[in-house]
Image (cartoon, rainbow, N blue to C red):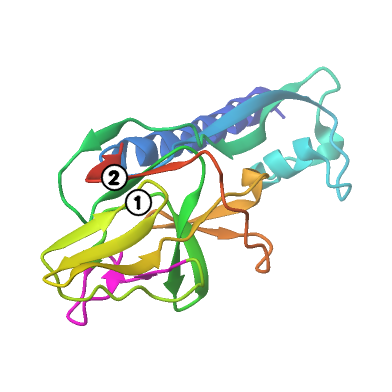
Amino acid sequence: MNEGIYIAAAGGTKQQRKLDIISNNLANLNNAGFKKDQVVFESLLAPFKEGSGDLGFENNRTLFLSPALSNDSASYVGVSDFSTNYSQGTLYRTDNPLNVALDGDGFFAVKTDAGIRYTRKGDFKMDNNRQLQTQTGEAVLDDKNSPIAIPAGSHISISSNGSISVTTPQGAVPVANLRVADFKDKSQLIKEGNGLYRTADPKAEGTTPQATIVQQGFLEG
């Protein structure tokens, strides 16, 4: 058996995974609030113990290499870490009153058919019932986990702390406060697509970040 073929194939599958991640990052480059993913490789030394859960064996099992046949001096490549980079993106002005960006930590809370999800994508809209929604139809939630309905008015104002008000002929009318939640351990957040995240623990609700500023008329790059 020429184990070099298996070593090369193992490296090729990991590079393919890296290219898939890079391609996904590039495809979402212009999506508001998107956070890029990254992968870390490590060297794995044979032999691998079948059935032990050894990272090396799990990484190469799909190549049909029997762990017992591996050379003691062989070195494979494996994935040691996969993570999302949650660093702050650049804010750019749109002057759309329903565009909202977070300058700091945290996520907007939205309601989906599967439960509450979190997002940094603040390009909101109103439906026919004047309910505040994401572009894909999830209801944006207030600090009481209720959908936000915007009454008719001449101007929608969202303050730096997330409070929403509408200007009417009778004056400014308070509407609701946007719910912004942060999570200390962001590795527990799982991407679901369309800029949405769920928590590994369905009961986790996060905390309100104290230093985060809500910016109306902006989106996060």
Residue 18 in the image: x percent, y percent? 49, 32
Please report the residue visible at 20 percent of the width from the left and 60 percent of the height from the top. 156
Residues marked 1 and 2 touching at CB (< 8 Å): yes
- Residue 205: image quadrant is bottom right
Which mark is first along the chain, 2 or 1?
2
Residue 41 visible to an observer of this rendering: yes
- Residue 193: image quadrant is bottom left
Q: Is residue 136 above or below residue 10?
A: below
Label 2 Cα neighbours within 10 Å, binned few <14 / some 14-19 / many ≥20 = some
Main SS of the magenta segment?
Answer: loop
Label 1 Cα neighbours within 10 Å, binned few <14 / some 14-19 / many ≥20 = many
Of residues 154 and 134, the one nearer the viewer is 154
Q: Is residue 87 above or below residue 205?
A: above
Is 52 covered by the magenta stretch? no
- Residue named by callout 2: 31
Residue 183 in the image: x percent, y percent? 62, 49
As drawn, is 203 to the left or to the right of 87?
right
- Residue named by callout 1: 121
Badge 2 amino acid: Asn
Label 1 residue SS:
loop
Residue 63 in the image: x percent, y percent? 64, 42
Q: Quarter holding the N terminus?
A: top right
Q: Magenta stretch: give its range.
A: 126-142
As drawn, is 107 to the left or to the right of 81?
left
Residue 135 visible to an observer of this rendering: no
Query: Separation of disc 1 and disc 2 at Cα?
Result: 8 Å
Q: Quarter holding the C terminus?
A: top left
